[in-house]
Amino acid sequence: MRFTLGYAGLPAGEAFDYINKKRDSLLSANSDFVGFPMSKKEGLSANHAKLFLTEFKSRLDSEFDKQSNLVGTCCAVIYRRSNNGSDIAFENHFFPAILPVPINWEPSGTTPDERRAAEKCLFETLVRTTARTREILAVLHRELRDQANTTPLLLPVRNFKSNSYRDWLRELQTNIAASNDEQLAKNVLNAATNAFEASYPRVRGSGEVLSFHDDRGIEFKAPGASRRMHGRPWMVEEHPEDMCHLAGFRRLGAPFNAAFHYDAQKNSPKKLTGRFCQCHGDLENKTGDPHLNIAPGDFTRI
């Protein structure tokens, strides 16, 4: 598994230039560096986030393997926290496809030597954060690879109607990004999964398969080991946001099978009718035949 790691929030000029020059020392052989200097005037803006999203999207074609239906990289953005309260808004630009991992660092020093010392501290912080980010992404990758049919991580954020799912996933993102090592990341993930399933246990719907059911009683039935997956997202279509593409291949930075989807159904074999949406746009009346195919990124089709 490769890793594509973005480094955001680094001020244009000395700090960004210092890290960019040391990028080879920052990364291991199976990692790629993505970085853009941050304008001090704009800060952690939507424009700064867009630079990274556009770059990640541009890599999808070369990263996607048609035989496995997987992109070959985990993705995260390691970013420097701001002091103006824009962190949450910045993280939201990457949700739910890319894992944001914050660090604390402020430029300091009035002399060149003092500024170099501060930048060396930044570099050391990024080295440690890069190492643990790779461990966190590996934990998430194993979960999506080995437990795709049972984990709640892949439920579609917009179409799985729940008063708590989005907040649960967002809280998991925050907590797992703060993990100091692989074992703690595993513990955070296990605790979060247990907490979610206490409210939304997998129960039998149609047939013998255990499935998640949303607040409308709609069953989200995973493919299962013996069922073929055939729901690869139609990325050739027009989408207004880069996230429409990115969320079709990764969840919290880790890749999942792009053909994975849920059969959304209720009282099967009756046709499902209800209000559903795509990865973008408003809710619409839709009718299944008898179910709808809904991917983790909310791509929906009959």
Image (cartoon, rainbow, N blue to C red):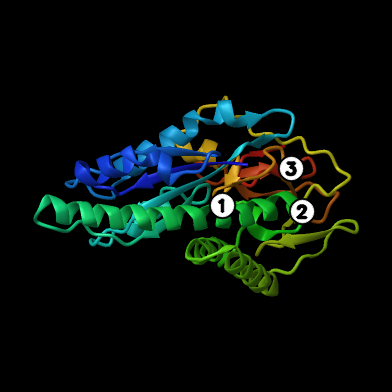
Location of residue 161 by image quarter: bottom right
Instruction: Name the residue nearer the viewer: 162 or 126.
Output: 126
Mark number displayed over residue 149 = 2
Residue 127 x %, y %:
42, 53
| 174 sits left or right of 37 in the view | right
Q: Which residue is mark 3?
A: 288
| 231 sits left or right of 121 in the view | right
- Separation of disc 3 and disc 2 at Cα? 21 Å
Amino acid type of the residue tagged 1 in the rendering: Arg
Amino acid type of the residue tagged 3 in the rendering: Gly
Residue 124 x %, y %:
36, 56
Q: Assess whether mark 2 and mark 3 are in contact (beta carbons under 8 angstroms).
A: no
Mark number displayed over residue 253 = none
Which is in the foreground here, disc 3 or disc 1? 1
Element class at badge 3: loop
N-terminal of the pair, mark 3 or mark 1, is 1
Q: Which residue is mark 1?
A: 158
